[in-house]
Image (cartoon, helix red, strand yellow):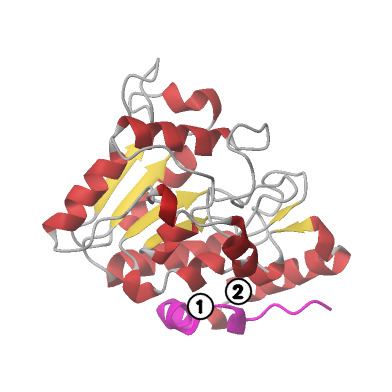
Amino acid sequence: MQSFSAADIPEDWRALLSDYFESPEWQELQTNLRSELNQGIDQVRPEPRNFFKALTLTPLAKVKVVILGQDPYHSPELAQGLAFSIPSNIPTNSRAFPSSLRNISKALSLEGFGALPNGDLHTWAEQGVLLLNTALSVKLGEAGSHAKLGWKSLIDRLIGGLAREKPHLVWMLWGGHAQSKLPLIGSGVDQLILQSSHPSGLGVYKTDRPFLQTGGKASCGHFTKTNEWLGKYQKTPISWVAPKEQSPSVAPQSTLFN
């Protein structure tokens, strides 16, 4: 039987979750996920050791910004345990490079930060950007396949606890799924909530709050607004695009996730 326990979650985040680990919801998640792993661990993405990578790379005390994704990439060799992030060795001009990341890179360029050198966002996580999916696992090749295993109860507790624990956070809510968490965030104090359409595919231009304007004329401005907000509260702005000489190479990335 594959192991899955509260000990897999970093201690600071376990403290935030408090009595959640005595709940029926936690027991349900454990049972369901262990069953999936026992059926074929090689069919689950990301690897179980990376389920809580977002919480490991971004300790509770350092969280400044939260970007909510839906579930991990279900294609081979992409999921890392960080929402939207992929390994740095995936070429930006390849078909494997997700459209959501392509449009995030376009938005950053339009806002004057420059294009992403690759799709690896672990430097964001290390600066206090919590890249949190609302389901932390998926079956290979089947989008949304683990959405009903019980992850929702865990992630909702994390989101609500984080909003109450930390004032002045920035929340980037892209698309209807992320925006469904608004009631949980509303319990927080002085939170900056940025909403737009999801950055993937054609949806990037849809709704009355598009992530990108049609024709690529402008972005939603979320990255600029975030740094302005952080500056207002004397917090270090996020370096969204590292200078080329400081961009992570393939070697450090392979070390981080192996």
Question: Label 1, label 2: how many angstroms apart (C-alpha)?
Answer: 7 Å
Q: Is residue 57 shown to the viewer in this render?
A: yes
Q: Position of residue 182 (x, y in %)?
A: 35, 49
The answer to which quarter of the image holds residue 174 is: top left
The residue indicated by pointer 2 is 26
Q: Is residue 13 above or below residue 108?
A: below
Q: Position of residue 248 (x, y in %)?
A: 50, 57
Judged by its main secondary structure, the magenta piece is helix
First to last magenta residue range: 1-19
Q: Are marks 1 and 2 in contact (CB under 8 Å)?
A: yes
Q: Is residue 161 left or right of residue 83?
A: left
What label does residue 240 carry, if any? none
Q: Amino acid at mark 1?
A: Tyr
The answer to which quarter of the image holds residue 185 is: bottom left
Q: Residue at x 64, y 49 (%)?
A: 89
Q: Position of residue 80 (x, y in %)?
A: 62, 58
Q: Amino acid at mark 2?
A: Trp
Where is the N terminus found, in terms of image quarters? bottom right
Q: Is residue 28 above or below residue 245?
A: below
Taking the magenta stretch, the answer to whether it contains residue 13 is yes
Q: Residues within 10 Å of mark 1 (few under 14, many from 20)?
A: some
Where is the C terminus found, in terms of image quarters? bottom right
Q: Is residue 151 left or right of residue 220?
A: right
Q: Residue at x 33, y 75 (%)?
A: 61
Q: Residue furthest top?
A: 215
Regarding mark 2 in the picture, which secondary structure is present there? helix
The residue indicated by pointer 1 is 20
The answer to which quarter of the image holds residue 221 is: top left
Q: Position of residue 91 (x, y in %)?
A: 62, 39
Taking the magenta stretch, the answer to whether it contains residue 215 is no
